Image: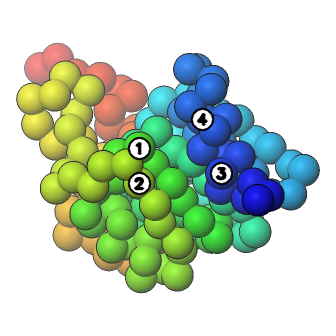
Amino acid sequence: MAATDLDLARALLIADKDATLVAVRDDEVITVTERGIKPLLAWVREGRDLTGFSVADKIVGKAPALLYAVLGPDAVFSPVMSWTGRAVLLAAGIATSYDALVPHIQNRTKNGQCPMDASVEDVWEPYEAVGVLGERARTLLAGPQLA
């Protein structure tokens, strides 16, 4: 049985401990090691098209799912995927697979919801989400403001 692009993306994600995202289309492989949604936001801004790609991403909540809805891969696998992330992907016609389906993605300190997912809690339109997520990313990168 021949391995599919999604099988390969999944295997490469698991094999490369530094990888956070692997996208595969035929012989083309893209590996990302940067955490968070920043690489996806950059791809959207660059106008990248992931049509035909299968993606394996370490964590997929609603925020990255909305960006994938813009980027348009054929399939997304994640070891951990949120319910709303899966719903967004399916609504966009993107096949999903996962190891664990969870109510929400936790933040990095595991004491609340992922701030990016929280910022798009009431957003369902992928292109609207791009603006909201870009602004939220700028706010988080700026760090705490001193009064």
Relative to 47, is 22 above or below?
above
Q: Is residue 46 visible in the rendered structure shown here? A: no
Q: Which mark, residue 79?
A: 1
Between disc 1 and disc 4, whose residue precedes? Answer: 4
Residue 85, x across and y down, in percent: 34, 62
User: Which residue was labeled with disc 3?
Assistant: 7
- Marks 3 and 1: in contact by CB < 8 Å? no
Question: Spatial distance from mark 4 to mark 3, Cα to Cα?
Answer: 10 Å
Dot in front, 1 or 3:
3
The image quadrant that residue 113 belongs to is top left
Label 1 amino acid?
Pro
- Marks 2 and 1: in contact by CB < 8 Å? yes
Q: Secondary structure at mark 1?
A: strand
Between disc 4 and disc 2, whose residue precedes? Answer: 4
Q: Is residue 75 visible in the rendered structure shown here? A: yes
Question: Spatial distance from mark 4 to mark 2, Cα to Cα?
Answer: 13 Å
Residue 94, x across and y down, in percent: 53, 74
- Marks 3 and 4: in contact by CB < 8 Å? no
Question: Spatial distance from mark 3 to mark 2, Cα to Cα?
Answer: 12 Å
User: Which residue was labeled with disc 2?
Assistant: 98
